[in-house]
Image (cartoon, grey):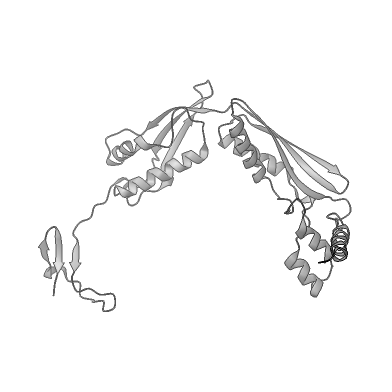
Amino acid sequence: MTKKNNRFVFFLCCAVIAACSPTKHIPEGDALYTGATIKLSADSVSSQQKKVLNADLEGLTRPRPNGKFLGIPFKLMLWNFFYTTKEKGLKANLQKKLGEPPVLASSVNLDANVKLLQNYLQNKGFFGAQVLADSTWKGKKASVTYTANGGPQYHIASVQFINDSSKLAQAITDISKETLLKVGAPYDLDLIKGERTRIDALLKERGFYYFSPDFVLMQVDSTSGNRKVDIRVIVKPETPDQAKEPYYINDVYIYSDYSLNTARSDTNHSKGEFYSGYYVIDP
């Protein structure tokens, strides 16, 4: 390609970009939402932990701004380039397929985002977390800054599992050695949910067929002071009796000539011969 052609393509691209300003079709009194910024302060949190928390908090905010590639909102610009108020036609189809409508500042619910971010921090052990939101408008663009004060993060002081003479309690005690809840670790609701799932999975391996993670109750006590919590793992009182009992394999019957292609309706166990712990049916 000659230099002359290169210049032509360059100026053509500039013309398209100039003609497709991101704010070109923003309604009067509204603005293009460009995203959220998180300013987090938290006690006794490493820089790496703070970086992860910042990323998680920013990812929770809604709505998400228009996507960008190399810092340019190409889909939004294409939406503007093919802009039309018609529902049908070539331009309307190209606008819908190639473009992306602008995310408007009016669609941002500050109160909902504040509650969401505050709830997330509390679930991570920042029980006294406070979040404030402040929107900034510059011409036809707007952004939001969320200032989050996490305060001290609570840590696990002790973990106590149910302890009685029942088969279920004994099984839970046996599997408690590999618990996800470690003394000294930060309080984390996701870990608590993971522990409930872990307990359920291992109990099912031990024959508690009707058990469910919903039957596990984590009692969290933060009144001991010094930013610590005591966790007590118990089984809910309303847990049905069948979920508290392990189930065992009874007799095993082996049909030597069984085939899925020629499935037999005759499953009479009286013909079986006991051999090495199994009943073998050999007609």
Q: Residue at image x 12%, y 58%?
A: 276
Q: Position of residue 4 (x, y in %)?
A: 88, 65
Q: In front: 96, or 134?
A: 96
Image location of residue 152, percent across then percent down: 59, 26
Q: Quadrant of residue 218?
A: top left
Is 83 placed above or below 27 here?
below
Q: Is residue 243 visible?
A: no
Along the line of sight, the residue nearer the viewer: 7 or 18 = 7
Measuring from the top left, give residue 188's x and y in whole percent.
52, 36
Which image quarter holds the C terminus?
Answer: bottom left
Most foreground residue, 125 or 57: 57
Q: Quadrant of the N terminus?
A: bottom right
Residue 178 in which image quadrant: top left
- Residue shown at 24%/52% (left/top)? 248
- Left or right: residue 123 versus residue 206 is right
Q: Position of residue 232 (x, y in %)?
A: 42, 32
